[in-house]
Amino acid sequence: MKQLTSMLVIALVCASVAFAASPSPDVKPATTTKESSKFKAGGCCDKADKKGEKCQHPCCVKAAADGKVCEKCNAPAKK
Ligand SMILES: [Zn+2]
Ligand SMILES: [Zn+2]
């Protein structure tokens, strides 16, 4: 019985060591996943968003109400 107890202790120690050695799946790699803004950089909505506000342009407010971003103000730069 005493041997069984010591075996159990060894097993527990091994398990805890293995647990400590293996990286926890909850710990994500420290990647700097910077949340890319859905607004066009430097745009009216982007500036307002950085201030923690919402763009007050009527076109942008309307788009935001539809759960979108104003395509007119946040269209990717072309040409
Ligand atoms: Zn805007
Ligand atoms: Zn707009």
Image (cartoon, rainbow, N blue to C red):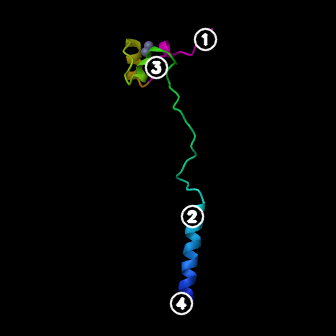
Residue at the (60%, 61%) spot, across then down: 21
Disc nearer the start of the sequence (4/3): 4
| Secondary structure beneath label 3 | helix
Name the residue tied to disc 2: 19
**Viewer-side residue, 77 vs 12:** 12
Quadrant of the image occupied by residue 3: bottom right
Residue 18 location (% of width, % of height): 60, 66
Q: Quadrant of the C terminus?
A: top right
Which region shows up in magenta? 68-79
The dot on residue 2 is 4
The dot on residue 78 is 1
Toward the top, the furthest residue is: 79
Disc nearer the start of the sequence (1/4): 4
Nearer the camera: disc 4 or disc 3:
4
Disc nearer the start of the sequence (4/2): 4
Q: For the residues marked 3 and 2, what is the alpha-carbon distance in whole angstroms?
A: 45 Å
